[in-house]
Image: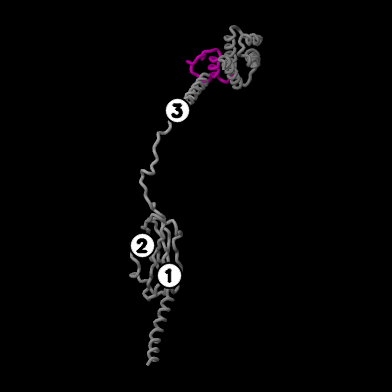
Amino acid sequence: MKQIFLGWLIACVCPTLAYAETAAAQVQVLSVHNPASYAGIQIGDVLQRTIRLSVAAGDQLNDSQLPLKGLQRNGVELRQLQIASQKQGGQQVYTLVFDYQVFASSGKPLQLQLPAEQLTFNSGATVSLPSWRFWLVAQLPDQLQKAKQSVIAQYRPALLDTQTPQRGLAISLLLAVVGGLVLLYRHADWSLLPMRHSHFSRAYRKLKKLPANAEGQKQAALLVQDALNQRFGQQMLAKHVPEFLLQQPGFKPLEQELHAFFAQANAVLYSGQTNDAAAYLQQCKTFTRQLRDCERGV
């Protein structure tokens, strides 16, 4: 009788074990991806886990056994669950993406875990996604102190020394005004400026209006000659240059230019020689401007 009972028990249990082994063999875990970092997690962070499974083509995932969106477990909430499937050869490949959001907070670092998930298929095969541990950073100090104990007494700030910047600003402004007046006095063309009506200033203004031709050459020579005569007080010739410089030593740097002018002026006015009119006019302008600067003492 005992042997009959043992035979009957073996006949019932062996097919059940064979079916369990077959069901387990129907599910293959292809990959599991956990979050990249397990430390430094803060409240509100979203952690994502992905698992890829391969089952027989006729088998299907049992949706009713999956965790529901919004389920909270130990300070962690399932924010979203994405499921995708596709056929590859004779297999059905499932990709499940779990998004968890952390709502726990602690005054000291705390170790939490994403919960383990149980996946069940219509064939009865099951697979478990194991839990995953991580560290939650501290949000608040363990012991709060009264704010009054940590407040630093306020002091009036030191007054800035404004005398030195103001003095430097005044000096800079004075230098800018003086420099501007010097440039204006030397280069301006307004007739109201002092010494604007001097002999060489008037000659220089008239030279700028002469045409670049033979007649313009003669007019240029006469204008410069007339300005020298007025400055000298009488008819000035080349032989009067030393006397002119002795009388007015401010024109001493232009001694060679004075001799050169008289030589060229004699050639233009009396010898009938013709030169490049434009070049001669420019030369007269340069010479007259030099005389004007000496006249002004610049």
Residue 55 falls in image quadrant: bottom left
For marks 2 and 3 on the same chain, the one whose residue lies earlier in the sequence: 2
Whether the magenta-drawn stretch holds residue 281 is answered as no
* Mark 3: few/some/many CA within 10 Å (<14, 14-19, 20+): few
Earlier in the chain: of badge 1 and badge 2, it is 1
Foreground pick, 156 / 229: 156
CA neighbours of label 1 inside 10 A, class few (<14), some (14 to 19), many (20+): some
CA–CA distance between discs 2 and 3? 63 Å
Quadrant position of the N terminus in the picture: bottom left
Q: Mark 2 points at which residue?
A: 74
**Residue 53 sits above or below residue 36 on the image:** below
Relative depth, front residue between 131 and 108: 108
Q: Is mark 3 on a helix, strand or loop?
A: loop
Residue 162 marker: 3
> For the magenta stretch, what is the residue range?
186-214
The structure residue drawn at horizontal position 41% and vertical position 70%, both measured from the top left corner, is 128
Quarter of the rendering occupied by the C terminus: top right
* Residue 78 in sight here: no
| Nearer the camera: disc 3 or disc 1 | 3
| Residue 90 occupies quadrant | bottom left
Label 1, on which residue? 53
Gap in angstroms between the C-alphas marked 1 and 2: 27 Å
Can you give x and y, in whole percent of width and height, for residue 38 in the image?
A: 44, 59
Closer to the camera, 105 or 21?
105
Residue at image x 38%, y 64%? Answer: 82
Amino acid type at circle 2 is Asn
